[in-house]
Amino acid sequence: MLAVEAIMRSLARHLGEDEELWGITGLLHDIDYEATEASMERHGLVAERLLSGAVPDAVIRAIKAHN
């Protein structure tokens, strides 16, 4: 996961985006993987439930869209 965070931070820097927000997204993008690996169509939906109210909506949208 730390590699994904590093890549996301680098991309954010390169694109002039919010490095902290992108880094957090990279860290959390598979937070629900173990809970959903048997039914990947739920991947992202469980993450939304886990993270709702704890992180900005932009993070949740990116996590849900990465499939």
Image: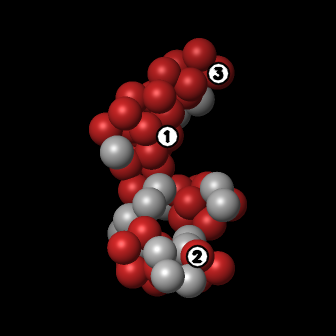
Judging by the rendered image, the residue that carries numbered circle 1 is 22
Q: Nearer the viewer, residue 34 or 6?
A: 34
Q: Can you say which quadrant of the picture contains the N terminus?
A: top left
SS at badge 2? helix
Dots 3 and 1: beta carbons under 8 Å? no
Question: Would you place residue 27 above or below residue 44 in this image?
Answer: above
- Disc 2 residue type? Met
* Left or right, 2 with reference to 22: left
Q: How far apart are the alpha carbons under marks 3 and 2?
A: 30 Å
Q: Residue at x 47, y 56 (%)?
A: 29
Judging by the rendered image, the residue that carries numbered circle 3 is 15
Count neighbours of disc 1 (C-alpha within 10 A) and say few if under 14, some if 14 to 19, many if 20 or more. Answer: many
Give the total of numbered labels. 3
Which of pointers 2 and 1 lies earlier in the amino acid sequence?
1
Judging by the rendered image, the residue that carries numbered circle 2 is 40
Viewer-side label of 3, 2: 2
- Disc 1 residue type? Trp
